[in-house]
């Protein structure tokens, strides 16, 4: 008789970044980050990450999240290094999020925007190979489940304004300042 075990629950990594707790939900089977973001006053435990994941990948979200956060491992180490000023430390962390082809292209392109640099939605669309798809590029930012690692915070409005950010424009501004400060120090 063959028995099948249920897939392991997702792991949670919590690291303080720019003065706010940052949560990453990680698949322990392959180390891919499936959802990530900051705690906010309206979401103090970042529970919305699992809710957002469930909308796009209900089977994976149904695995739940382990109660005990991970203190070590590649994700925790890279996030701590980023928080300490190594803004490139998160560049090669594996991520996985479901979406249509162009949205996946936008997410891949976001990872090419260098820390300390901000580009507009129109530049992002151009970088993704569809210069006229500015709204689709913006939608890719808005639906990004893996904030920070897929750096939608590096996208600004054409007038130079910060635009929106799911976790608040204050955090977006602090992230850009953090990256700018440490990127300038390297140059």
Image: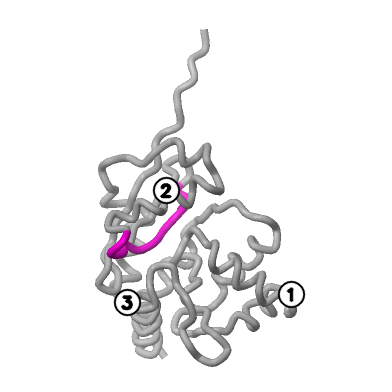
Residue at mark 2 to residue at mark 3: CA–CA distance: 28 Å
For the point 59% across and 65% down, which residue is it? 107
Residue at mark 1 to residue at mark 3: CA–CA distance: 33 Å
Apparent side of residue 156 relative to residue 84 in the rendered image (left or right): right
Q: Pointer 3: what residue? A: 85
Q: Please tell me whether mark 1 sits on a helix, a strand or a loop.
A: loop
For the point 46% across and 41% down, which residue is it? 61
Query: Which labelled disc corresponds to residue 50?
Result: 2
Q: Nearer the viewer, mark 1 or mark 2?
A: 2
Tally of numbered discs: 3
Query: Which labelled disc corresponds to residue 130?
Result: 1
Mark closer to the chain start, 2 or 3? 2
Label 3 Cα neighbours within 10 Å, binned few <14 / some 14-19 / many ≥20: some
32 is within the stretch colored magenta: yes
Mark closer to the chain start, 1 or 2? 2
Residue at mark 1 to residue at mark 2: CA–CA distance: 31 Å
Q: Please tell me whether mark 3 sits on a helix, a strand or a loop.
A: loop
For the point 27% across and 63% down, which residue is it? 21
> Which residues fall within the magenta stretch?
31-42
Apparent side of residue 119 relative to residue 68 in the rendered image (left or right): right
Mark closer to the chain start, 1 or 3? 3
Outermost residue toward the top in this view: 1
Say above or below: 110 vs 123: above
């Amino acid at each position: 008789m063959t028995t099948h075990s249920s897939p392991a629950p997702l792991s949670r990594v919590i690291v303080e970044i720019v003065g706010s707790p940052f949560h990453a939900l990680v698949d322990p089977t392959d180390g891919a980050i499936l959802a990530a973001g900051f705690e906010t006053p309206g979401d103090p435990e970042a529970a919305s990450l699992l809710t957002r994941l469930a909308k796009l990948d209900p089977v994976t979200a149904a695995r739940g999240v382990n109660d005990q956060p991970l203190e070590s491992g590649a994700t925790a180490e890279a996030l701590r290094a980023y928080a300490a000023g190594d803004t490139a430390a998160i560049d090669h962390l594996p991520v996985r999020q479901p979406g249509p082809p162009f949205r996946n292209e936008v997410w891949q392109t976001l990872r090419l925007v260098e820390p300390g640099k901000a580009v507009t939605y129109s530049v992002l669309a151009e970088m993704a190979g569809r210069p006229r798809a500015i709204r689709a590029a913006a939608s890719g930012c808005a639906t990004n489940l893996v904030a920070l690692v897929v750096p939608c915070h590096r996208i600004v409005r054409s007038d130079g304004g910060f635009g929106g950010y799911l976790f608040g424009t204050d955090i977006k501004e602090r992230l850009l300042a953090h990256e700018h400060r440490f990127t300038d120090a390297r140059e």
